[in-house]
Amino acid sequence: GLVMPERIRTGTLQVGCMGYVVAGLRDPREARPGSIISLQKTMQTLISNQMELPSSDALTHQSVLYASVHPMEGDGFDEMHAAVNRLALNDTGLEIHQTAGSSNNGGGPFLGPGLRVGFQGLLHVEVFRQRLLDEFDLEAIVTPPKVPYRIQYLESKNYKRPPGAPMEEVIEDLADWPAQGHRFKVLEPMVDVRILAPMEYAGNIMELTKRKRGTRMQTKPIDEHIWLFTAAMPWADVVTDFHDDLKSTTAGYASFDVSEADPPQQESDLVKVELLLNSEIVDPLAFVCHRDVAQSQARVVCQKLQEVLPRQQFVTVIQAKADGKIIASSRIRAYRKDVLTKGGKTVGGGDITRKRKLLEKQKKGKKRQQATGKVQLSQAAFNSVISRG
């Protein structure tokens, strides 16, 4: 039928008409842009005329980074899930997978159930978060973006792969990172970065590029004021805080774009850093970095989490772990009530036994709260992991 703007049923559509077709699709996302609709009886004619049909790969957008999306309120998952599915109807770049809060792939006891969403880039993440807020009035927590890594397992005497398990796999969720003790190589995605900036900021840009593990750096003058800087950089370092750092070091004058590098992947000595709150692993806060800077970046993240996490009635211990060892730690002191004063008077007078009894009772209560208490995570906590450079 035709849309004029009301629907008018005509039974046919001619060339140049804009209309609608009612199909028996169970999932609206199956109707991808570029799809060809044909009657069953004319399908053989299309094939016999050797008409070029779009492949499934051409209609599918490959996500370049992944992030977990969780509702701000613990009971708002169903509402958020429905909103994300509605956004996906006109945003074919979204790749949505549901995670379970009780499994390692979910948010665990800190975030609860959520969605694992694939995006086309950093700007796509920001647009997605803003559309959720503007169109559905939903505030969602988006974890730091993760890029896919290619893992190549090596022969090991202590740990052998199960029969039939592949010796090479692509990991898009850090919860699937190989456990400690396995021998493997990591290939990370690489991109070519092109930066346009005034020449007086050349030193700052070269220093930033080197800090972000940039290689094959080249400079080319465009005119007497503007230079073009090119380098190959790990995609994981670009999607975190490279944009903010570049703007800061060039007073906002620099601009950049990226393209796939050749070769698209590079072997690197990477390690997974896990964050723990009161000895409980928070999977969404985990990140991957080069082994040489793992300890320094873990200290920065622990320090920032200490500043942004709310103070509780119990001590909050923040730890970072890599290769099975604690490499950084910080603590958030608990609120403490003065139990020795009541009504402006000192309890127990000069009796030290009475005072010790009250202090020991308070200490046991704090310890019990620390074992059962829940730390509330916010978007600022995840931003601490993003800006860890």
Image: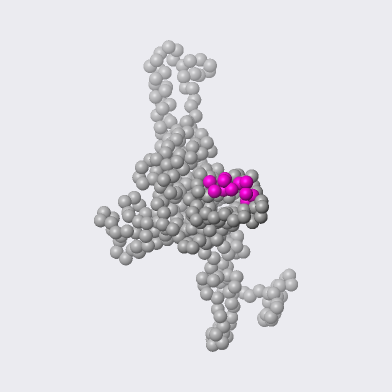
Q: Residue at x 56, y 87 (%)?
A: 49
The residue furthest left is 157
Q: Which residue is drawn at 49% across and 22% down?
A: 338
Q: Which of 259 and 82 is in front in this view?
A: 259
For this view, does 163 lie left or right of residue 340? left
Q: Nearer the viewer, residue 75 or 285?
A: 285
| Segment colored magenta | 197-207
Where residue 364 sits: x, y (%)? 40, 29
Quarter where residue 296 is shown: top left
Where residue 233 sits: x, y (%)? 50, 54
For this view, does 214 lie left or right of residue 325? right
Image quadrant in which the N terminus is located: bottom right
The residue furthest front is 224
Q: Nearer the viewer, residue 372 or 39?
A: 39
Q: Which residue is drawn at 42% across and 22% down?
A: 358
In this rendering, the answer to whether 11 lies above or below 222 is below
Q: Can residue 209 be seen in this view?
A: yes
Q: Residue at x 47, y 62 (%)?
A: 263
The residue furthest right is 4
Q: Does the magenta stretch include residue 237?
A: no
In this rendering, the answer to whether 135 lies above or below 21 is above
Q: Is residue 272 visible?
A: no
Where residue 17 sits: x, y (%)? 70, 77
Where residue 341 sits: x, y (%)? 49, 18
